Image (spheres, rainbow, N blue to C red):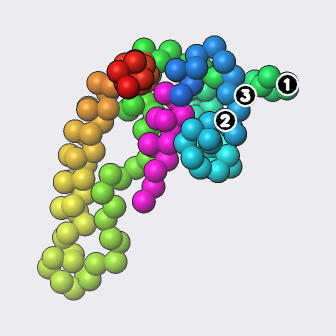
Amino acid sequence: MNTRFAVAVHILTLLAVFRGEALTSEFIAGSVQTNAVVIRRILGKLREAGLVSALQGPGGGFTLAADPSTLTLRRVYEALAERTVIPIHAEANPKCPVGRNIGTLLDEVVSGAEAAMLRSLDDITIETLARRVAKHEKAG
């Protein structure tokens, strides 16, 4: 299963919580508990989308480039070019009435599901998640 979206949200929330500090990919990888190479790949996509900045040299690392109060999860999803919430098999039998039509029918269903998901992701910002992390930390 592809977890890039979840990892990207983790990274951006971490950068929001540590706002003003440049975090290394190794530090971020420690939080996510994955390899720093995986983190750097995702950071590359986020950087291309203008969501993070990279600082070179000693004390360098990554910082949040976007305003966390307006950075929605939809924007993160779209930055990763994550497409198709529900993958559809491509090799259906064109001689079968179901096989001939199921792709088109499922495309309609998936499009509707993705539209609903994107509307939901529009309502959640990275700042909201960072605040919830802080709230959980105080409570725990």
Magenta segment's dominant SS is helix
Q: Badge 3: how crowded within 10 Å, few (<14), some, or many (20+)?
A: some
Q: Badge 1: how crowded within 10 Å, few (<14), some, or many (20+)?
A: few
Q: CA distance from mark 1 to mark 2?
A: 15 Å
Comes first in the chain, label 3 or label 2: 2
Tell me which residue sits at (43%, 30%) in the image.
Answer: 75
Amino acid carrying mark 1 in the image? Pro
- Residue under label 3, please give it: 61
Q: Badge 2: how crowded within 10 Å, few (<14), some, or many (20+)?
A: some
Residue 119 is drawn in which quadrant?
top left
Amino acid carrying mark 3 in the image? Gly
Q: Is residue 91 above or below residue 82?
A: below
The secondary structure type at the circle numbered 2 is helix
Residue 98 is drawn in which quadrant?
bottom left
| Numbered badge on residue 58 | 1
Q: Is residue 59 left or right of residue 45?
A: right
Q: Position of residue 10 (x, y in %)?
A: 49, 35
Residue range corresponding to the magenta coloring:
1-13
Of badges 3 and 2, nearer the viewer stands 2
